[in-house]
């Protein structure tokens, strides 16, 4: 198996766009779904639909992050199935440069924007909006962000970086995970994944950590990487099975994928059908189905291979890194000047432009540097 699945790049790009929509909408108190005592209903039919129906798909922010983790596990595992010789030093150098350099530059820009533009909150906006760019900057804050992998508030400057902390931690141990994926069958690996998440769930209840950069969540999200790797291991046979299904079953599977992916917002008044593990693994099922459908359906594959969608996939990491910086900068600069809908529409357009620039000036050179350094190491080994 030595193949690049362009559809999955596009899927990552669409997920990054959904995260952008999520943060644009979450500035409003009525859509701040993680605020204390948040009421998951509204008299406004459109708001209610966004909260409690599969329409949640268009702003499913946390769900998109879970999809990112599954996609990462899928893609990182492919060289193992291609029987490539993988040296840990080469792998971790490439992976670190790929993630850290763009992160560092975006964080520096976020800190500068915070210090120069923030007005320490705007009362009309949500609790989420008003806890970002409103804390005093200390040397320890800067140090925590530079060191990257510690336990600290990721909301202070660029709220999206919490997921990158988990991404990098899991990337460090990923070759160990692949030992299990390669050695055991799919039932055992799913059992291991569920065990990780169950242990994490129990520890979260017992300890109740403050920040979402805690190591307990890393244990839980390790399961998502494993499931992505397991999906990649069996993708060819799964795709073959899916393609042979009747069209009616394919349609049902797509509808089920949407419902499963957005499950956390459906029937929230029925408490016993929702908890952390149920909601998270519903997203895992939906994400896995989206990946399978993307690689199996000619219609979806054709859509995901459209040039604009492929480009969105190419810039997805930069779009993820910069969109909240753009959002907060524009709100603090223009909130008293133009209507908020103009600011939000501008955020979408400018975020894509900034992400495109960042991709070519920062992200792509970071990947090139990783290849250059690892190729240099390989040449030195050959000489030795």
Image (cartoon, helix red, strand yellow):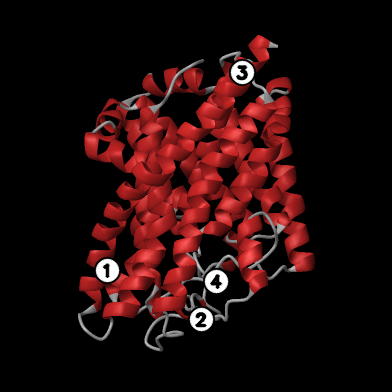
Callout in the foreground (3, 1): 3
Q: Is disc 4 placed on a helix, strand or loop?
A: loop
Q: Are marks 3 and 1 in contact (CB under 8 Å)?
A: no
* Among numbered discs 2 and 1, the one appearing first in the sequence: 2
Q: Residue at x 54, y 81 (%)?
A: 37
Give the Cα distance between marks 4 and 2. Answer: 7 Å
Q: Is disc 1 placed on a helix, strand or loop?
A: helix
Q: Residues within 10 Å of mark 4 (few under 14, many from 20)?
A: some
- The spot of residue 26 in percent (x, y) is 40, 71
Callout in the foreground (2, 1): 2
- Answer above or below: position of 279 versus 173: below
- Answer above or below: position of 324 versus 38: above
Residue topped by disc 2: 134
Callout in the foreground (4, 1): 4
Q: Which mark is drawn over residue 378?
A: 3
- The spot of residue 262 in percent (x, y) is 44, 54
Residue topped by disc 4: 156
Q: Residues within 10 Å of mark 2 (few under 14, many from 20)?
A: some
Residue topped by disc 1: 344
Give the Cα distance between marks 3 and 1. Answer: 48 Å
Pick the quarter of the image with the C terminus. top right
> Residue 322 sits in which quadrant?
bottom left
């Amino acid at each position: 198996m030595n193949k690049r699945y362009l559809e999955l790049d596009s899927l990552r790009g669409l997920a990054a766009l959904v995260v952008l929509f999520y943060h644009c909408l979450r500035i409003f108190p009525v859509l701040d779904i993680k605020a204390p005592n948040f009421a998951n209903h509204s008299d406004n039919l459109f708001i209610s639909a966004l909260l409690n129906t599969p329409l949640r798909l268009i702003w499913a922010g946390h769900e998109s992050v879970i999809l990112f983790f599954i996609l990462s596990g899928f893609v990182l595992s492919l060289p193992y199935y291609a029987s490539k010789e993988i040296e840990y030093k080469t792998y971790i150098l490439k992976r670190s440069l790929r993630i850290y350099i763009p992160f560092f530059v975006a964080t520096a820009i976020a800190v500068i924007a915070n210090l120069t533009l923030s007005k320490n909150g705007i009362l009309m906006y949500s609790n989420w909006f008003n806890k970002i760019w409103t804390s005093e900057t200390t040397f320890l804050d800067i140090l925590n962000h530079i060191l990257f992998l510690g336990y600290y508030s990721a909301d202070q400057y660029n709220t999206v970086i919490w997921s990158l902390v988990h991404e990098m931690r899991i990337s460090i141990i990923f070759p160990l995970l692949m030992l299990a994926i390669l050695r055991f069958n799919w039932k055992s690996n799913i059992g291991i994944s569920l065990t990780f998440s169950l242990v994490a769930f129990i520890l979260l209840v017992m300890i109740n950590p403050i920040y979402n950069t805690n190591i307990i969540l890393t244990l839980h999200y390790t399961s998502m990487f494993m499931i992505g790797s397991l999906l990649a291991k069996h993708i060819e046979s799964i795709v073959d099975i899916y393609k042979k299904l009747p069209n009616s079953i394919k349609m049902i599977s797509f509808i089920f994928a949407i419902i499963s992916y957005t499950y956390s917002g459906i029937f929230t008044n029925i408490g016993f059908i929702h908890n952390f593990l149920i909601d998270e693994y519903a997203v895992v099922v939906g994400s896995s189905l989206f990946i399978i459908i993307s690689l199996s359906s000619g219609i979806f594959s054709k859509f995901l291979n459209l040039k604009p969608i492929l480009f969105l996939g190419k810039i997805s990491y930069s779009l993820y890194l910069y969109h909240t910086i753009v959002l907060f900068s524009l709100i603090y600069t223009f909130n008293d000047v133009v209507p908020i809908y103009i600011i939000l529409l501008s955020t979408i357009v400018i975020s894509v432009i900034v992400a495109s620039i960042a991709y070519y000036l920062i992200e792509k050179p970071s990947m090139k540097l990783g290849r250059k350094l690892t190729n240099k190491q390989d040449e030195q080994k050959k000489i030795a």
